[in-house]
């Protein structure tokens, strides 16, 4: 049997709170890859991200600066990590960090580090603030929305929308508001945390679905798996879900990838109303936290993403197992203070 | 009155619709009825078989069977064209 190549892959998103980062799921998928072995380098922002202490999942972790610090701060840190770990691939898993990583893609490539990310144009075009234009351009049904930069515009919403409406932050956070008063409260809370603008979106009643997948950057669908959320947390995150065979969702996904020539992993957030009309609520430009279901369903999407990043020819998956479920759980790890100290003081563990 | 081909009904009575991920359970009679429907039997044929096997009145069974078909239809379990015929 041929020995598999061992790749050094850096992964972010090691947090696992009730709105978990995708890192741990991505790593579990990579550890089950058939085409390579891995050494996993965790990239963490905070010293309490659980993935740091999961030593059977993450081999070594380095702290990295927050995305807001800019690429001038991030690059030297990545250069240092690369000098120690000889990274082959980085998989960023947070929306907010994609912008700096996309900016650094060429420089990192020159260092021998590969990524497989959407282009800056693709990243910007699908932003929540641009979703309406996106829907119009590609003929995909999206909820009506208004982008607010100023709270004085809130009063005019009553004539435009019927309540409830969704109040969304630029990158994260969304709340359902049943009155103008609630919109004002959520506007203040979300803008204080994530900045402006705030997006007001029509509330679509229905059933929530997600599709995760991988585009090759040339319009081809490499992988796509629709999932119905079976258990939803207060934050709207799937805590349990099941793979389904909805041809309308797969067709919408293929169209999205073909039209945009999307490069990289993604998650489509969809809502199906009682008339079976499908609305695209959001496009997340990275793999979702439930990506490990893709392995269970027969499409190891993180593995395919790494192979594309390395410039290998990757055949599109043609089937997946319908009715595979994921059920998430949380558990308490017991961690020695010395480990916490090591990552907090030295930024490495 | 046909159960759609892609619908999975387990022996224990779990009905799973792979298109929307919905699942629910039916009792042993429900399993038996869906199984007979799968075999392509008509309403009258199924009614005759059930009345022969169980001690129940035709009127009572057929009322319940209609309700059961409505439930299956609401869950998208029946083939659309066939549902109309039923």
Image (cartoon, rainbow, N blue to C red):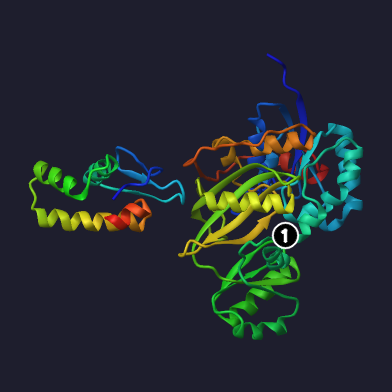
Q: Residue at x 64, y 45 (%)?
A: A213
The answer to whether one can see residue A20 in this image is no
Residue B61: percent from the left, percent from the top? 14, 53
Residue A256 vertical position relative to residue A155 in the rendered view, above or below: above
Q: Residue at x 35, y 58 (%)?
A: B74
Crowd class of label 1 (few under 14; some 14 to 19; many from 20; radius 10 Å): some
Q: Residue at x 24, y 58 (%)?
A: B67
Residue A269: percent from the left, percent from the top? 60, 57
Chain under numbered label 1:
A
Q: Which residue is mark 1?
A: A126
The answer to whether one can see residue B47 in this image is yes
Residue B10 found in image quarter: top left
Query: Split into 4 quadrants, where in the image is the N terminus of chain A?
Result: top right
The reply, left or right, for residue A201 in relation to residue A348 is left
Residue A174 found in image quarter: bottom right
Residue A22: percent from the left, percent from the top? 66, 46
Residue A169: percent from the left, percent from the top? 69, 67
């Amino acid at each position: 049997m041929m020995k598999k190549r061992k790749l050094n892959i850096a992964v972010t998103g090691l947090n696992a709170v009730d709105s978990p980062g995708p890192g741990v799921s991505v790593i579990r998928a990579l550890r089950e890859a058939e085409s390579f072995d891995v050494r996993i380098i965790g990239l963490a922002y905070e010293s309490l991200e659980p993935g740091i202490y999961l030593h059977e999942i993450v081999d070594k972790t380095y702290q990295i600066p927050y995305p807001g610090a800019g690429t001038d701060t991030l690059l030297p840190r990545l250069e240092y990590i690369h000098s120690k770990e000889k990274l082959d691939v980085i998989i960023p898993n947070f929306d907010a960090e994609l912008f700096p990583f996309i900016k650094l893609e060429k420089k990192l490539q020159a260092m021998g580090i590969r990524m497989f990310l959407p282009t800056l144009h693709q990243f910007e075009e699908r932003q929540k603030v641009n979703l309406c234009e996106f829907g119009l351009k590609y003929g995909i049904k999206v909820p009506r929305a208004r982008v607010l930069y100023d709270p004085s515009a809130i009063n005019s919403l009553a004539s435009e929308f019927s309540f409830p409406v969704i109040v969304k932050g630029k990158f994260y956070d969304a709340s359902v508001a049943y009155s103008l008063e609630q919109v004002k409260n959520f506007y203040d809370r979300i803008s204080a945390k994530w900045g402006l603008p705030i997006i007001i979106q029509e509330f679509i009643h229905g059933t929530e679905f997600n599709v995760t997948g991988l585009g090759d950057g040339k319009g081809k669908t490499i992988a796509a798996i629709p999932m119905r959320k079976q258990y939803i947390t207060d934050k709207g995150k799937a805590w349990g879900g099941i793979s389904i065979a909805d041809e309308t969702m797969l067709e919408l996904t293929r169209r999205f990838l073909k039209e945009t020539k999307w490069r990289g992993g993604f998650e489509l957030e969809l809502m199906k109303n009682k008339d079976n009309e499908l609305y695209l609520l959001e496009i997340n430009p990275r793999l979702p936290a439930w990506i490990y279901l893709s392995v269970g369903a027969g499409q190891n999407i993180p593995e395919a993403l790494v192979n594309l990043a390395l410039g290998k020819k990757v055949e599109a998956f043609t089937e997946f197992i319908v009715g595979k479920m994921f059920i998430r759980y949380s558990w308490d790890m017991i961690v020695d203070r010395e480990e916490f100290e090591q990552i907090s003081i030295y930024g490495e563990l | 009155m046909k159960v759609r081909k892609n619908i999975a009904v387990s022996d224990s009575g779990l009905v799973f619709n792979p298109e929307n991920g919905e699942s629910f359970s039916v009792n042993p009679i429900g399993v038996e009825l869906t199984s007979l429907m799968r075999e392509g039997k008509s309403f009258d044929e199924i009614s005759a078989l059930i009345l022969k096997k169980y001690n129940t009145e035709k009127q009572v069974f057929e009322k319940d069977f209609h309700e059961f078909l409505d439930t299956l239809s609401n869950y998208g379990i029946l083939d659309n064209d066939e549902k109309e015929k039923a």
